[in-house]
Amino acid sequence: MNVHEEKERLKLVHNQPLFKGIPDETFALLMEDCRLKYYRKSEKILHSTPPFEGLLLILTGMAEVYVEDENNNCEVLEVLQEGEFFGFYTLAHFLGEVEDSIDHHKFEIEAAENSYCLHIPYSVVQVRWEDEFVRNFILKKVAVRLRDTYSSLAEQLKFTGEWGESEPFVRRVQDLMQSPAITVNEEETVQNIAEKMVDYSISSVLVIDGNEHLTGIITEKDIVQRVVAKAFSGSLKAKDIMTSRLYTVSRHDYYFEVLSAFYMNGVKHLPVVEGEKAVGIVTLSNLLTKRNRGSMGIIKTIEESSFENLPKVKYAIYDVLSNLIHDEISTIQTLEMITKLYDRLARHCVKLAVDSLERQGKGIPPVSFSWYQMGSSGRGEQFMLTDQDHFLVYADPEKENEAFVDKYFSLLGQEIVNHLQQAGYSLCKGRMMSSEEEWRGSVTKWQQRIRQWALKPTDDHILLGYNFLSFRFLYGDPSLDGLFTNMVQYQMKSSQTFVYYMAQQEREKLVPQFEHPFQILFKGKRQMIDIKKHALFPLHHCLQVLGVHNGIIEGTPVLLLNELVKRGALSDGFADDLRHAYEVALRTRIQMSWKKHLRHEEITTEIKFALIRSWEKDELITMLKTVRSLQFHLLSKL
């Protein structure tokens, strides 16, 4: 860490409530007793048996606190974010109380991201304890922690002996996998492999090379079919009998995604990987021992659906959505899971459309193609099926085949629209669908189209640009997607005037400034707010323009925020405020729309202030002010 970085870190520390307001000389003396350290992801920050003598402050990054029982099983107790402390549980020890049962447990803290942490000994806490503000701050933190502990205990009691309806969808692979996985080298003999499987009472081993990269898997079935059944008596090695065509999952994949992988690929063992290395293994029996609640059924409902029974998929997904809302799963996490199901449904519709043309004698795709969603689907915000927003891109055909290729994709675009409509997606009122000539074409045609938008930045073209820039690749040839995305990135980089005009539209549509009382803002017809018009759209548009300005073309709002922070276009603190505002806006929209859906009312995005509570109004004020701040931030950059 260079001198400038160290000064910045110490500035962060000095602004913390524990040290804020003290003279520089006093602060410097206290820092001599503290220890500022950088930890890489997955590195142990603290490994000790309590009492832990002091506090730990997370300056940047994130850490996870584990507790280890007598059988060496670890359970995550809490996740520490930036600005949070660990060690308040030892205040009794600090205040002179004798500790008892807690000494039987061993705590570990591991960096979940690259992190800077400050170790603060109790000698420093003792000095600051004389400040009433510091005592009140620590008391408040302890009170909040106690409240959260009781809430957590209540939640555990609620689900004791009975899984929550959405539990299988919330659980991830890392909660289910066997780790570490048992591995063997490619040169290991089959005899030794069989003995190892017997010793560990396992039905599979993972095969790795000299760099510990995963290269294959050997199951009991492989040994039976490739060794025993063929009566081999020679010295076979792992590389001779392993299955090298691997299906793998990530430790962060959801429960239902893993079930899907088992179902689709016909396997019973899935290696869990990070990069090229295996970090565990999950088996079908692992998952089947958990209570399922029909999560396997939703995957089958989607994958086995034909054109005739596509409509039932919508209601199967709505059942999942209902459980997630009922169990009060966070809005962002709910949308992440529901988006994965909708993505699977959309991909299935495109596949059915391609198969349908082949059955009709129209042939197969003459060139590679890729299919994209836009709008709420592209942003990963579609919690209920609304209208269609999508487009088609295909590889540039030979000149003599151009008419034939265009004709095929004209038919495919219409077929995709038909299947999506059958599944419950209504037709787009603005005709932004791949059935329309303006929303399909070769890479070259798309290049010309985007250039035309940029050369004539009319309101209509800017509106098209906003919708287009929410695109997300969903089906087709990944290499063509890469070519297309690079082309769009180059065109937008060469069209800064168009980007400037997009930004200026935000100047003309600023989120209204709020004064108290809140209702003053909305007189007459404006006794309400449109959560899409006044919050979500401005936020989306600003992030899109900032993204393009910084060379970022694709990504959901959350991914755009993260990437803008990485590139220094947004500060960490402002990004956190925007994430919270985004969560508030989405949660408000989903809760309101879902209630209307259950009452069979027309779904709108307008909120009448007379019908909401004071704290909800305050939350909306803060959210809208944050979005307005983003608009001004954008205008200051362009």
Image (spheres, rainbow, N blue to C red):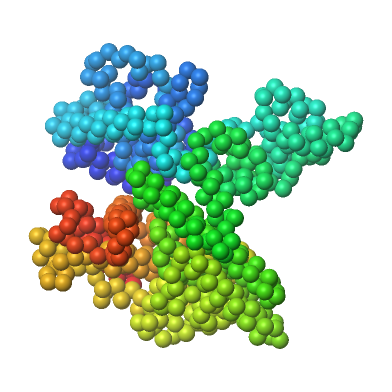
Q: How many marks?
A: 0
388 relative to 64, above or below: below
Position of 254 with respect to 332 (left or right) is right
Q: Residue at x 12, y 63 (%)?
A: 519
Residue 633 is drawn in which quadrant?
A: bottom left
Q: Please state if 407 lies on the left or on the right of 535 as rendered.
A: right
Residue 145 percent across, percent down from the top left? 27, 32
Q: Is residue 304 above or below residue 153?
A: below
Instruction: Find the residue positioned furthest to the front.
Output: 308
Pick whichever, 575 or 516, lies toward us: 516
Query: Up-down: is 198 above or below 611?
Result: above
Q: Is residue 161 visible?
A: yes
Q: Quadrant of the C terminus?
A: bottom left
* Residue at 10% in and 65% down: 520
User: Looking at the figure, which quarter contains the N terminus?
Assistant: top left
**How far from the left and from the top, in percent, is residue 21?**
18, 41
On the question of residue 562 being in view, the answer is no
- The residue sitting at 19% across, 58% down in the picture is 621
Q: Residue at x 33, y 22 (%)?
A: 53
